[in-house]
Image (cartoon, rainbow, N blue to C red):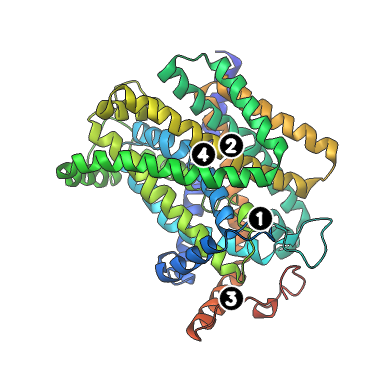
Amino acid sequence: MDITTSINSIVSSLNGYLYSYILIFVLLGTGVYFTITSNFIQFDFKNASKAFKEGISSSDSKDRKLSPFEAFAVTTASRVGTGNLAGVAIAITVGGPGAIFWMWITALLGGALAFAESTLAQIYKVRDTGTDKTNTHYTGGPSYYITQGLNSKFLGSVFALILVLVFGFSFNAVQANTISQAFNNSFNIPTYINAIVLAGLTAIFIFKGLPSIAKATALIVPVMAILYLALCLFVIGANIQRLPEVFNMIFANAFGLREFGVGTLTGTIITGVQRGLFSNEAGMGSAPNAAATASTSHPVKQGFIQACGVFFDTIIICSSTGFLILFSGIDFANSGASGITLTQEALSSYFGSFGGIFLSICIFLLAFSSVLGNYFYAQNSMLFLSKNPILMLVFRFMVIASVFLGSISSFSLVWNIADLLMGIMALINLYALIRLSRHVREAMLDFKAQIAQNKDPVFKKTSITGIENVECWD
């Protein structure tokens, strides 16, 4: 047994314990808690649509670093990537069709978590270092609301460090790994060539700065997501008569009523929650890093916008990939294909070689935009830890190196390390959310009270007790 296999075995065992006995209960339990205490805020589609429309209409503003829509695009860029294409295939292969159901549950409860963490990120956001009190350039995220809200600089720093490791290195390695596999499968391009190209492109955007990343993701994500969904909807439409059969397959396997030769009921649930969390990131504490940068009149508006992102990611895109695979008739339990290879085979079964090629291009654009979104999060946390320019330069080169190495590394090891770090990070953030849940509820009640008075909600720090020292609200 070589050292890579040994490390992979250890990390896999740690993941099994973390997800089987700890995270699954904490994540779902916290989601239920926020769903109930917020009166099912993630299903308040009326106010969510208003907030989303306002975010789009203000996207041409030039007096802030990121508009609400650009913040949404960055978070969606990080969410919509390999988790939607390769992750769903892994969920079905490992946990059976029922894993899709548990991905849905994770998303439905995760909408409340996304709302809570993004609202808190807005409440505790700060102005960029070196700017004066009249501008609207912001930064923030869990490290900031942990430090200020919980008065724990140490825990905030630990979270920031883990986020850098997860998004700066592990997740970017995962995204690069998927791109490299896809291009190797479709075009027989050697992985080392893919690694060189991806690392070079990453370097270009990293050194051009965050504004270029925001603009790139705002352009790439909507276009490629729509094109991918169009193909999936075509497949669903062509097989509409089989839709009840597929739903029955999902629900039967989700509760252990039917075996498909893959996993057990426990494995199905764990796999679905794992892949759901990896895909939509709800409660993980990543999206708030971008949500905090948006300029908005009330924190709850950004909370609604980010909750929409969870639904779009998992309920729409992940479901489309799941239906694509299940409609294809591929024997996923015995085919030997896994991850993005299985998704490519499913699409090729409908569209021939065009399907595989199109998906490879889709994967490249969506996964590469995820690399950019991940870097956005990681840099935000690095700046929380240190603003030393030499350290920042070293960090950027390490991100580029992780993209290169991820393109040529062991597939299972890359995923397992990402899962382990993601789970630890999520636990810290969920702890902070519970401790600060009162602020989320008070902000939500203030928002709804102003809506009831036919006002455009405007937040003031006097609306919430215990936040007198926050910087960016009057």
Mark number for residue 442?
3
Give the residue at mark 4: 17
Give the residue at mark 1: 142
The CA distance from mark 4 to mark 3 is 36 Å
The CA distance from mark 1 to mark 2 is 20 Å
For the point 70% across and 65% down, the residue is 149
The residue mark sitting in front, 4 or 2, is 2
Give the residue at mark 2: 371
Q: Amino acid at mark 1?
A: Pro
The CA distance from mark 3 to mark 1 is 19 Å
Q: Secondary structure at mark 3?
A: helix
The residue mark sitting in front, 4 or 3, is 3
Q: Secondary structure at mark 2?
A: helix
- Mark 4 and mark 1 lie on one chain; the one further toward the N terminus is 4
Q: Secondary structure at mark 1?
A: helix
- Mark 3 and mark 1 lie on one chain; the one further toward the N terminus is 1
What x and y, as percent, mark residue 285?
A: 60, 52
For the point 68% across and 41% down, the residue is 164
- Mark 4 and mark 3 lie on one chain; the one further toward the N terminus is 4
The residue mark sitting in front, 1 or 2, is 2
Whether residue 45 is visible to the viewer of this picture, yes or no, is: yes
- In the figure, is residue 335 to the left or right of 429? left
Q: Secondary structure at mark 4?
A: helix
- Picture quarter with the N terminus: top right
**Pointer 4 and pointer 2: residues touching (CB < 8 Å)?**
no
Q: Amino acid at mark 2?
A: Val
Number of residues whose C-alpha sits closer than 10 Å to that of mark 2, classed few (under 14), some (14–19) or many (20 or more) = many
The CA distance from mark 4 to mark 2 is 28 Å
Q: Residue furthest left?
A: 241
- Mark 2 and mark 3 lie on one chain; the one further toward the N terminus is 2
- Mark 1 and mark 2 lie on one chain; the one further toward the N terminus is 1
